Every structure is written in structure tokens, then in C-alpha cells.
């Protein structure tokens, strides 16, 4: 049994592929770090609908949310619990319209995207690519 159960905010992110198999990464306005698009799940919100909403708000893209490819929990620097779920997503568009939360974006090969992202998000990209290759 876990000695200290995790109480966590739920974060949903999309590993978003366009037809050329490139993955979208976005640059945070707060610290300049790169991440996959997504955000927090709202109360009473269905998870796939939440990731769809977050991606649309952050990028302006309409996406097809597929299945989850990775889930992970952690504590941030302030010792707050986090639980992240990463979904494989598809889009036929590549015209991104960023929200105020991000300053830049890039469509990258999955391998390059995985290197630019944190280890956890890079792992989600690799798992989404494996799902694609099946």
C-alpha cells in the first residue's frame, strides 16, 4: 500500500500528428520550455472532450482524439500532485493559431520532437508513434 496517496490535478495532452507524420510542439510563454499542447481537465468534463477543448484553445486546430498512449503521475516543484494522460491525436490541418499561453510552435519529426520535450512527454511521443506503426 502507498504510504502517501497522490491527490492530483489531471493534465491532458495530445501527441498531435498531421498527415506527414510530424508532431506539434508548442513553446510556453512562461518559461520558454517546449511541450505538447493540452491542459487541465475541468470538473465534470469527459477526458477526450477535455483534450480536444484544450488543443483547440491553445492551437486553433480541430483534432481527432484517439486513444490514450501514456499516463504518469508526479509531484511538481511545489510538491503538488499531478496526473498526466497523453492521447494520440490526428489533424489534417497545419495552420496553428497560438493562444497567449504559447509564443511559438513547430511541426517536428517524432524523433526530433521527443528529444526537444521532457523525458515524460518524449516517452508519450514514442508510444504514440508505436501505436501508429501497429
Image: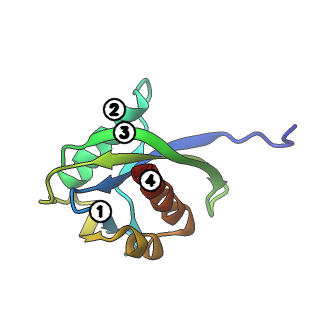
Q: Crowdedness of circle 4 by 10 Å Cα count: few (<14), some, many (20+)? A: many
Above-or-below relation of 3 to 111: above
Q: Crowdedness of circle 3 by 10 Å Cα count: few (<14), some, many (20+)? A: some
Q: Secondary structure at mark 3?
A: strand
Left of 76 or right of it: where is 104?
A: left
User: Closer to the observer: label 2 or label 1?
Assistant: 1
Q: Sequence-wise, which precedes: disc 2 or disc 4? A: 2
Residue bearing the label numbered 4: 128
Above-or-below relation of 1 to 19: above
Q: Sequence-wise, which precedes: disc 4 or disc 1? A: 1
Distance CA(mark 2)–CA(mark 3): 11 Å
Residue bearing the label numbered 2: 49
Distance CA(mark 4)–CA(mark 1): 13 Å
Distance CA(mark 4)–CA(mark 3): 10 Å
User: Closer to the observer: label 4 or label 1?
Assistant: 4
Return the residue nearer the eye: 114 or 8. Answer: 114
How far across and down, in percent of the image, does residue 32 sit?
A: 37, 75
Q: Secondary structure at mark 1?
A: strand
Residue bearing the label numbered 3: 66
Q: Secondary structure at mark 2?
A: helix
- For the residues bearing labels 2 and 1, Cβ distance under 8 angstroms: no
Amino acid at each position: 500500500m502507498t504510504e502517501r496517496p497522490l491527490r492530483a490535478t489531471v493534465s491532458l495532452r495530445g501527441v498531435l500528428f498531421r498527415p506527414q507524420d510530424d508532431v506539434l510542439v508548442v513553446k510556453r510563454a512562461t518559461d520558454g520550455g517546449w511541450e505538447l499542447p493540452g491542459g487541465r481537465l475541468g470538473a465534470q468534463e469527459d477526458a477526450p472532450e477535455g483534450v480536444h477543448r484544450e488543443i483547440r484553445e491553445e492551437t486553433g486546430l480541430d483534432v481527432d482524439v484517439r486513444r490514450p498512449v501514456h499516463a504518469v503521475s508526479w509531484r511538481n516543484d511545489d510538491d503538488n500532485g499531478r496526473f498526466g494522460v497523453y492521447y494520440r491525436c490526428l489533424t489534417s490541418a497545419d495552420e496553428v493559431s497560438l493562444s497567449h499561453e504559447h509564443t511559438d510552435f513547430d511541426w517536428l519529426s517524432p524523433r526530433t520532437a521527443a528529444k526537444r520535450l521532457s523525458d515524460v512527454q518524449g516517452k508519450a511521443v514514442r508510444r504514440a508513434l508505436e501505436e501508429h506503426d501497429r
